[in-house]
Every structure is written in structure tokens, then in C-alpha cells.
Amino acid sequence: MNLLYHELLVQLSTMPDQVTLRHDVDSMQDLAQCPIMAIVEKELGLKSTFFFLPFVSETWPDFRYIRNFVAQEQSVGIHIDAGPYMPSGEGLLGYIKVGMRQLGLVGCRCSGHGSLNNHKYGYSYEIWDHYDPYVNKGLGYKGKKYSLSTFSLVGDLSMLSDYSFYLGDSMGEWHYHTPQMEVPVPYEGNLPITKHPTEVIKQCQQRHRHIQVLIHPGYSL
Ligand SMILES: [Zn+2]
């Protein structure tokens, strides 16, 4: 693991009550780094959730071994991309149900994959009936709403309501936002970071604010 990511994890471990730590496993590179990430976090006493893309993950060698290893150290959830990877004719319901079965999950949390296709083909956190457009900025989705329990899901970490700050390394670049920034779509609208990521976290710690941190394990190499 590189020094920056190790430094970030150490820093987050000093403020466990203020942190929601999330890993989206989008690529082979992410998958390969999952075990070391899980071990380092366990050593630091840091809780996190690893979200796997089911239909892509299934095609990766060692996927099941690594997913099972990670599940022993940290929690595991489903990463939703109902766009390009949606099995034909299955719809969102099928994606989540079949995907959870593939991952061996019951009653897990989910996170949305930040692709435009995903929003286009029907998935964003706005589909959940407890989504609050005043708290969670969105695209103004008007379609059918679902309850998380329909899918035996217990939470969607793509939603903004549970934290004040967001810091993520999507596409290999650090981005952050706060709900006050009026970002319409969290993934595409994130502002490039102007401070060092450790400075953003330090700021949250000093202000006693909650922060969600998204780390793709592959970038920690
Ligand atoms: Zn993703």
C-alpha cells in the first residue's frame, strides 16, 4: 500500500465515530488490492464496507476467494450498475436479486456505480422511497419508488443524508463535496480537490463533522 493511502487510513482510524468508509470494487486492480486493504484496516481497528460489482466480478479469477476473505475481515455489499452490466430483461430488481445471490449476500448495503449509464438505465439513490430531495440533491427522478427492504438491502451509501462531507478517489483523482455545495449529481458534479485529502479529513475532525470516504482499493497500489 502506498504512503498516502496508509496515512489516510491511519488518520481515519483516529476518528472512527465520524467516518463512513466505503470501497467500490470496479476493476481487477481494485479486486487485487482488497485483501491488503482489509488487513491494514483490521489492524487499525477501522470498519469499512467493500462493494462488489456482481456480474463483472464473477468473470474475474479468484473473485470468490477474495470476496470471502474480505468478508471475514470487513463487511461486504453490492455495487449497483444497472447500465451496461444489467442481464437482459432482468431489470433493476433482477440485477439486485441475482447479483446478491452471486455474491452470496443477504441483507447487505449497496452503493451506486458512478456512471452516467447507470443513471440512464434506471438506478440512482433517488429510486428509494425514503430519498429526500431536499436533503439529497438529485436529478429529479419521477419514476417508480422502491423500499430498500424489497431487495433485502439495509442502506444505500450513495445517499448523502448520513454525512456532511464526502471525499472520494473516483477515476484516480481526489474529489470532495458537502451537501451545501448544491451538487446535482454527486459523482459527476464533484469538485476537484484543492487541498490535500488529509487536510479535508482534518478539517472534518476539527469541526466534528461526519465524513464519508470512498476509496477504490486499486489506487492504493
Ligand atoms: Zn464503481
Image: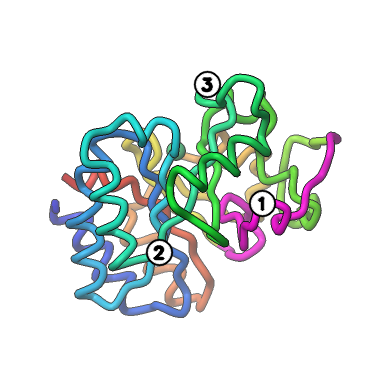
* Magenta stretch in the rendered image: 142-164
Does 7 sit left or right of 137 as displayed? left
- Circle 3 is placed at which residue position? 84
Q: CA distance from mark 1 to mark 3?
A: 20 Å
- Looking at the picture, how far across and down is residue 104, in whole percent? 44, 52
- Circle 2 is placed at which residue position? 75
Between marks 1 and 3 in the image, the one whose residue lies nearer the viewer: 1
How did the renderer colour the structure? Answer: rainbow
Residue 88 in which image quadrant: top right
Q: Looking at the rendered structure, which numbered label has been put on residue 33?
A: none
Q: CA distance from mark 2 to mark 3?
A: 26 Å
Between marks 2 and 1 in the image, the one whose residue lies nearer the viewer: 1
Does 209 sit left or right of 182 as displayed? left
Comparing 170 with 45, the one in front is 45
- Looking at the picture, how far across and down is residue 25, in whole percent? 36, 43
Q: Is residue 206 above or below residue 160?
A: below
> Mark 3 is on which residue type?
Pro
Q: Earlier in the sequence, mark 2 or mark 3?
A: 2
Residue 43 within the magenta-colored segment of the rendering: no
Q: Residue at x 28, y 78 (%)?
A: 45
Instruction: Classify mark 2: helix, strand or loop.
Output: strand
Comparing 56 with 139, the one in front is 56
Q: Is residue 47 above or below residue 189?
A: below
Q: Residue at x 72, y 41 (%)?
A: 138
Does 7 sit left or right of 214 as displayed? left
Q: Is residue 175 above or below residue 212?
A: above
Comparing 123 with 219, the one in front is 123
- Looking at the picture, how far across and down is residue 161, in whole percent? 66, 61
Q: Looking at the rendered structure, which numbered label has been put on residue 151?
A: 1
> Mark 1 is on which residue type?
Phe
